[in-house]
């Protein structure tokens, strides 16, 4: 007995209406057919089917698909998570607190993966993990478990962050002799600060708020929305832009408190000789004195106008500039300390010849324009002169 393989489909006969098999292609004898070619054909057709449909069609009804989960994105993130030793750090810190480190680490990873792949609330994360994605070692969890894991992460964040940075610095061979720091702010579209409306209804002393409830406060944001509550976010990065650590402060926190907190937190990380770099927003005498404690080093930008007495003295000193680039000349100035026992401060005065030339042209044009406007105004009546002054 000889069997033949054919590709066919049923069509209804135009007159009788009965299904009739129509051969599309004849593959020849079954024992002589090219099995690899058939496999390629099946794979090509399966591209147009869902995975469970392809599996059911290939098994001819012998396999029942019970569940189907996404894997790719979560699997890649999980491999990066372990390569950076984030999971290892969380498990080790959790074990020291007598917690189930494996369960806490898997829940924290699941929440992080959800924020990266399908951002939503923690309640939505429980459904996402239980129904839509496959995460190794985490078949699912409750919203209460998610909140407990986040409470642990918040309480142990300093220990975990230090361990993760050490592993990342070793893995990437980071240069951490210079650390750049800066702050920004973000606000909420609401009329009251954090917790005030809720606590005021329960407790007459609305000022005794927990720190995590009172972080969203009114302040002076950098986006000029002081009518809305905000938080201040600080970040320290390496010279290559790799994050070292991030902090969140109440919206009313000043730069002086922030820069001291950053210095104290990084002091326990066993970093080598560290130079902290910040912009002119942090450049105050108190901040410089605090950063210099214990032999600390820093580089701060200073304002050209309305600057402090030491910077004004440095600008007034005469000296020769040294060219370090086509658009940059520098000179070094040491300013003696005003207080006894304090060390002298070193300033590097930078000069951009191209920018200076452009500024000079702009000033000349402004002077010419203003002279034209006020020419002959000495003979005008006082009221007209006041109107001109107001317009200028």
Image: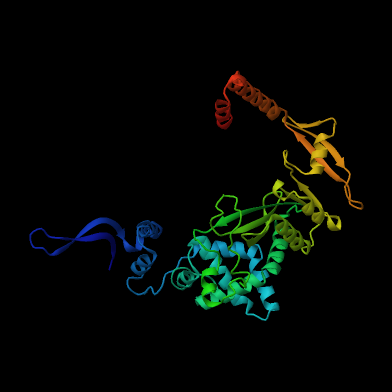
Q: Quadrant of residue 349?
A: top right
Q: Is residue 373 above or below residue 330?
A: above
Which residue is at the front of the view, 202 or 378? 378
Residue shown at 57% from the left, 65% from the top: 78
Colour pattern of the rendering: rainbow
- Check the image and report above or below for 384 versus 217: above
Which one is in front, 169 or 68? 169
- Residue 72, position in %: x, y? 50, 62
Q: Which residue corresponds to the image point at 62% horizontal and 58% vertical from the top-left?
A: 232
Query: Please, which residue is most extreme toward the left here?
Result: 15
Left or right, 103 with reference to 169: left
Query: Which quadrant of the figure contains the N terminus?
Result: bottom left
Q: Residue at x 32, y 70 (%)?
A: 60
The x, y position of residue 17, in whole percent, is: 11, 63
Residue 193: quarter of image: bottom right
Q: Position of residue 104 (x, y in %)?
A: 60, 75
Residue 80 visible from this viewpoint: yes
> In the visual, does 51 lie left or right of 330?
left
Say whether residue 210 is left or right of residue 347: left
Number of numbered tags placed on the structure image: 0
The foreground one among 168 and 369 is: 369
Query: What x and y, as percent, mark residue 194?
Result: 55, 66
Considering depth in this image, is 376 or 89 the residue closer to the camera?
A: 376
């Amino acid at each position: 007995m000889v069997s033949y393989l054919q590709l066919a489909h049923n069509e209804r006969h135009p007159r009788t209406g009965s299904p009739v098999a129509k051969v599309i292609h004849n593959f020849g004898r079954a024992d002589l057919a090219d099995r690899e070619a058939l496999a390629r054909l099946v794979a090509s057709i399966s591209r147009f089917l869902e995975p469970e449909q392809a599996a059911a069609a290939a098994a001819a009804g012998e396999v029942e698909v019970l569940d189907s989960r996404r894997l790719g994105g979560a699997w890649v993130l999980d491999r990066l998570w372990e390569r950076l030793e984030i999971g290892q750090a969380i498990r080790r810190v959790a074990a020291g607190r007598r917690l189930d480190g494996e369960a806490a680490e898997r829940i924290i990873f699941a929440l992080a993966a959800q924020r990266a792949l399908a951002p939503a609330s923690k309640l939505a994360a429980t459904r996402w993990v239980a129904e839509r994605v496959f995460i190794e070692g985490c078949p699912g969890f409750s919203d209460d478990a998610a909140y407990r894991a986040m409470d642990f992460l918040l309480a142990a964040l300093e220990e975990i962050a230090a361990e993760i940075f050490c592993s990342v610095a070793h893995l990437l061979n980071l240069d951490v002799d210079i650390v750049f720091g800066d702050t920004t702010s973000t606000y909420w579209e609401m009329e009251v600060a954090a917790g005030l409306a809720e606590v005021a209804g329960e407790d007459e002393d609305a000022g005794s708020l927990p720190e995590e409830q009172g972080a969203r406060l009114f302040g002076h944001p950098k986006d000029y929305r002081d009518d809305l509550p905000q938080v201040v976010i600080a970040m320290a990065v390496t010279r290559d832009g790799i994050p070292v650590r991030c902090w969140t402060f109440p919206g009313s926190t000043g730069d002086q408190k922030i820069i001291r907190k950053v210095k104290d937190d990084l002091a326990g990380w066993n970093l080598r000789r560290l130079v902290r770099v910040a912009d002119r927003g942090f450049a105050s005498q108190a901040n410089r004195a605090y950063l210099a404690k214990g032999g600390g080093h820093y580089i701060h930008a200073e304002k050209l106008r309305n600057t402090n007495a030491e910077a004004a003295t440095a600008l007034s000193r005469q000296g020769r500039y040294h060219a370090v680039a086509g658009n940059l000349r520098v000179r070094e100035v040491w300013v003696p300390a005003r207080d006894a026992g304090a060390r002298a401060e070193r300033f590097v005065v930078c000069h951009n010849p191209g920018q200076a030339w452009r500024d000079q042209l702009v000033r000349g044009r402004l002077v010419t324009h203003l002279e034209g406007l006020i020419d002959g105004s000495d003979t005008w009546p006082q009221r007209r002169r006041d109107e001109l002054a107001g317009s200028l």
